[in-house]
Image (cartoon, rainbow, N blue to C red):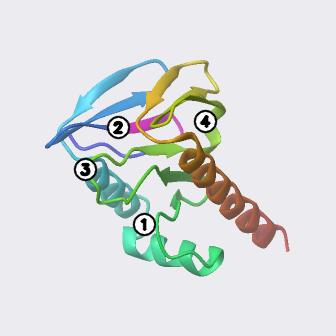
Amino acid sequence: MNYEFSRGTLAIIPNDEESSLVYEDDSRYIVKQKPFKIMEESCIYFGSTYDGRKNGAKEILGADYKVPIVVEDSNSIIAFPTSSPTSENCCWISLKRVKKIEKVDYNNTKVTFDNNIEIIIDCSYRVFENQLSRASRLDLILRNHKNS
């Protein structure tokens, strides 16, 4: 089963070496693809390449690594990685679905989504907060471009 990141996606979490745990509005399930592969194929599904999206975000943000990705333009679907995108433990989080984050311990952050689903992410609070901020900045800049 191929999976495309959509407005219903909350997070994509690595499950094992060959699959991901996908959280959506009211469900979660295993997809037999790695998170990075899902992101690559989602970008293609919506008319671009992952590298194209990544390079655009790099230019806009002036950042070189762990940049957020505009998965789909018209609905402003932006996802951000919790670590290096090709890392085995990288999770992808939907920017617009995050409601609240809380520090659990040094290496874990609790994320509450807009539908009140909570998950613990293997990522420090500081790193998660930085990634959330970077993705929010990208969203703001793109919205300003659309309105000018």
Identify the residue at image location x=41%, y=29%. Answer: 23
22 is higher (above) or lower (below) than 66: above
Q: Secondary structure at mark 4?
A: helix
Q: Quarter holding the C terminus?
A: bottom right
**Disc 4 residue type (three-letter):** Arg
Closer to viewer: mark 3 or mark 4: 3
Q: Earlier in the sequence, mark 2 or mark 3?
A: 2
Residue farthest toward the front in the current orientation of the protein: 106
**Disc 2 residue type (three-letter):** Ile
Q: Main secondary structure of the magenta part?
A: strand
Which segment did they paint magenta?
7-13
x, y (%) of residue 35? 30, 47
Q: Quarter holding the N terminus?
A: top left
- As drawn, the label of residue 13 is 2
- As drawn, the label of residue 36 is none
Q: Earlier in the sequence, mark 4 or mark 1?
A: 1
Identify the residue at image location x=53%, y=21%. Answer: 118
**Disc 1 residue type (three-letter):** Gly
Q: Secondary structure at mark 3?
A: loop
Q: Earlier in the sequence, mark 2 or mark 1?
A: 2
Q: Which residue is mark 3?
A: 88
Quick check: marks 2 and 1 in contact, CB under 8 Å? no
x, y (%) of residue 147? 83, 68
